[in-house]
Amino acid sequence: MSNENKRKIIIDCDPGHDDAIAILLAAGNPAIDLVAITTVAGNAEIEKTTQNALKVCEIAGVRDVPIAKGAGQPMVRKRETAADIHGDSGMDGPVLPEPTLNIVEEHAVDLIIRKLLESDGDITLVPVGPLTNIAMAMRREPAILPKIQEIVIMGGGTFGNWTPAAEFNIYVDAEAAAVVFESGVPITMMGLDVTHQALATVEVSDKIASIENPVAKFVSELLVFFRQTYKDVFDFEHPPVHDVCSVAYCIDPTVFNCKKLRVDIETRGDFTYGMTVVDTLGVTHKEPNVNFALGLDHGKFWNMLYQTLGNYSK
């Protein structure tokens, strides 16, 4: 596939087991032109998520994609991490050597701004962690807004996983999420409603383990740890690979069933802070601002991942 036909994306992430698999799907799929990877505090502190991004790119052989360190704190609130799910390192389980790759000197926010301003308006932002970097870029340089082709977010849903009302990525920096959701930029949202359908069953894990290359082995090891923490914390039999959904949508939107809905971000409620308030029935009569994912084609989704992991060399 020629570069002209590839979809240009910037992944903004907080690796994270599912973030790591999302990066590998993007880096190994011929439909994607991975323009940059930026990191944010979320699943772990910024130093750890940045180190994890470097490790993922190292094992994948990704050496020509700039990796930039971003925000270490939310815009307003104190930082929260998800060590119960991802371990102290943010990517516990596999044992990887220290990376030889280095981050670029540019801050993630500056890199996002520069790449968008230099573009022809053909870059999709794929934030799969808290939205701090994206919101800060929008605030710092509003001229990027018409340059963003689309934002494909992993976050939110009609229910929560960090509080009863809020999903982790949105909860960690709801003020940032409000900036992004009110920006007017086209948004596709991979919330818990759809990501909890993307479950890495034993059959899926066995299929990945049968792919004979180091990258697939790494993913298999990620899923072993992830499966156990989801069992311990949520009593899930199989872990959902949340962030992979956002990259999969960029590769083939037909994998997902979506509907245009109105979504607003709650930033003041004592019990509902970080809630994505989804108007499923149109009762607010507000203009829809989100392409909201409701379901996915399991065959297409998993075959995409298997085929992409098979693209990596033995």
Image (spheres, helix red, strand yellow):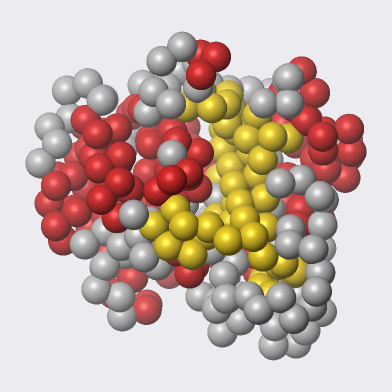
Q: Position of residue 21 (x, y in %)?
A: 37, 44
49 relative to 1, above or below: below
Of residues 230 and 193, which is closer to you in this image?
A: 193
Point 76% across, 45% down: residue: 185
Q: Describe residue 4's horizontal placement relative to residue 222 as left or right.
A: right
Q: Describe residue 180's horizontal placement relative to residue 101 as left or right.
A: right
Q: Position of residue 105 (x, y in %)?
A: 69, 23
Point 41% across, 15% down: residue: 1
Of residues 214 and 303, which is closer to you in this image?
A: 303
Q: Describe residue 230's horizontal placement relative to residue 164 as left or right.
A: left
Q: Position of residue 42 (x, y in %)?
A: 58, 56
Point 76% across, 53% down: residue: 180
Of residues 7 and 95, which is closer to you in this image?
A: 7
Determine if residue 111 is in view: no
15 relative to 174, above or below: above
Quadrant of the rendered image containing residue 136: top right
Q: Residue furthest top?
A: 2
Q: Position of residue 5 (x, y in %)?
A: 51, 19
Quadrant of the rendered image containing residue 226: bottom left
Q: Describe residue 149's horizontal placement relative to residue 51 as left or right.
A: right
Determine if residue 263 is in view: yes
Q: Quadrant of the C terminus?
A: top left
